[in-house]
Amino acid sequence: MNILILNDGRMGHLNQSIALAKHLGADYKIFPVQFTCKVFKLFSYVLDRLKIYTTSLFKLEQPITQSYDCIVSAGSSTYYANKTLARKLGIKSITMMLPQSYRYDFDLIFAQAHDHPPKQNNIISLPANFSYVEPKGLFVPKGKSVGIIIGGNNALFTMDQERIKAQLDFIFKAFQGYEIAVTTSPRTPEAIERLVQSYPFAYSVIFSRNKINPIADFLHQCEVVFITIDSTSMISEAISYGTSCVEILPLSEAKNNKFFTMTQTLEKEGYLHLFDGTLGNKNLKIDFHHYAQKVNA
């Protein structure tokens, strides 16, 4: 199978499309895409309702020179191009998220349950974002280990230094004798990075200084992995690979948001535990390889 992947420039979106291709064992090529001008995105909603598809609304950074079996994408800046090119090339159109504001007439839609997708034959509801995890050998502990994955600020959360400190203090007290590893992310505030550096971690990655990603190795090696609640991508990876128990570190008391809705549902199903000062020992894993086979159904 040969897959054409559209990329809107957001790694969280692109990684879901790549994950599908890898679970299928397919070859793939990535094509960056963008609307020719911003207002054309609004036009695309209207044209989609009218079932009018034209390549003049968007541009690819490179020409399509070979044949593909399907086109895959995630993100609102890709959906109109996805439909248009699928029709032009005569191939399947697949999205990795619910394509809100567009008609749900793609050949296949993988939609996260927290987006409350409608029940349609072409919509596959997922408990989390599509993920494919590949350990890289960046973290190789000599004994029992615990991993901590720290995200950062976003539209809904601002990291509280005192809250993070209290969580780190608990982990170091509860896991004496373990190798405790940590990684920050591109969004981690400088103050939180300084806090992290004040602890005696056996292994640490401060992303602003060392742009590597050991998350897959944490999932492969660690008995327990703690993850801040601000990233659906990181959480999705953690509940799809390895045997680690997953603890989600809350960043506020807010519960009326997609992050809490997603994690609360996953907790009820046994995939993770919302950290409340105790450990939940939840390590059920999602089989995304099984979901990927829907493409061939």
Image: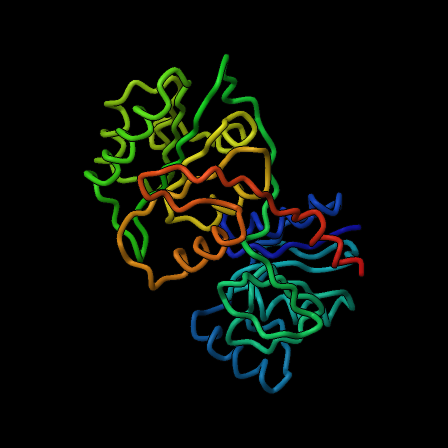
Position above or below: 179 against 98 = above
x and y percent of residue 130 in the render?
59, 51
Residue 73 occupies quadrant = bottom right
What colouring does the structure picture have?
rainbow
x and y percent of residue 215 in the render?
49, 33
Position above or below: 130 against 151 = below
Front residue of 86 and 241: 241
Task: Name which residue lies at 51% across and 76% down.
Answer: 101
Task: Name which residue lies at 49% across and 63% down.
Answer: 114
Specify whether 281 is left or right of 2: left
x and y percent of residue 107 in the render?
71, 69
Position above or below: 229 against 226 = below
Where is the C terminus found, in terms of image quarters?
bottom right
Identity of the residue furthest to the bottom in this view: 50
Identity of the residue furthest to the top in this view: 142
Specify whether 180 is left or right of 89: left
Task: Name which residue lies at 23% across and 30% down.
Answer: 195
Specify whether 205 is left or right of 269: left
Front residue of 284 and 82: 284
x and y percent of residue 61 in the render?
58, 55
Position above or below: 177 against 161 = above
Task: Name which residue lies at 74% across and 45% down.
Answer: 27
How many numbered circles does the render carry?
A: 0
Front residue of 284 and 95: 284
Specify whether 202 is left or right of 73: left
Front residue of 249 and 8: 249
